[in-house]
Image (tube, grey):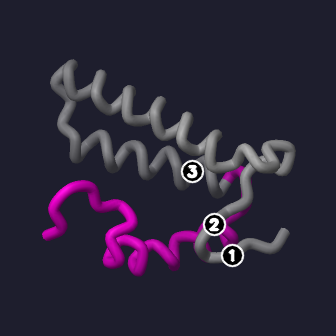
Amino acid sequence: MSTSPDDLPLDPTLGEDRSDARRVAYGYVEDAFNEAQQDGLDSDALAHAALFAAFRTLVETYGEEATAVFAEALPGKVRGGAFTSGTRH
C-alpha cells in the first residue's frame, strides 16, 4: 500500500466522504476531551493518551513503516500551524 507522508488512507469505501468522516471523528474526540476535562483530568495527560491510542491504531491498521512515514511529516505541520488554533506562539 502506498502512502504519502501527508495522509494515511482511510477505508477506501469512504470515497468522497473522507474529510466529512474525519470532521465527525474529530468532533467525537473533542467531546471526549471536554468531558474528561470536566471530570478533572489534565489536558496534557489526555493529549498524550490520545496520541498513544491514535498511533497504536495507525500501526495496527497500516503497519509501522507507513505510520512512521506519516509521523515524519508532523514536525513541519506543527511548525506550519496545522494544529494551531487562535494566536500562534
Pinpoint residue 89: horizontal percent, then vertical percent: 13, 70
Q: Amino acid at mark 2?
A: Asp
Residue 7 sits in quarter: bottom right
Mark positioned earlier in the residue sequence (1 or 3): 1
User: From the viewer's perspective, is residue 38 above or below residue 78?
Assistant: above
How packed is label 1: few (under 14 Cα within 10 Å), some, or many (20 or more)? Answer: few
Which numbered disc flags the more N-terminal residue, 2 or 3?
2
Which residue in the structure is indicated by mark 3?
Answer: 56
**According to the image, label 1 marks what residue?**
4
User: What's the distance in space between the residues labelled 1 and 2, CA to CA?
Assistant: 6 Å
Our reading of the magenta stretch's main secondary structure is helix
Locate residue 34: give its quadrant: top left
Q: Provide the residue span drawn in magenta.
A: 60-89
Q: Nearer the viewer, mark 1 or mark 3?
A: 1
- Mark 3: amino acid: Arg
Circles 1 and 2, Cβ within 8 Å, touching? The answer is yes
Horizontal arrangement in the rendering, residue 24 relative to residue 88 (left or right): right
For the N terminus, the quadrant is bottom right
Task: Give the vertical position of 85 relative to 7 (above or below).
Answer: above
Q: Is residue 59 above or below residue 53?
A: below
Residue 64 magenta-highlighted: yes
Whole-number angstrom distance, CA of label 2 to CA of label 3: 16 Å
Image point (26%, 55%), residue name: 85
Q: Which residue is mark 2?
A: 7
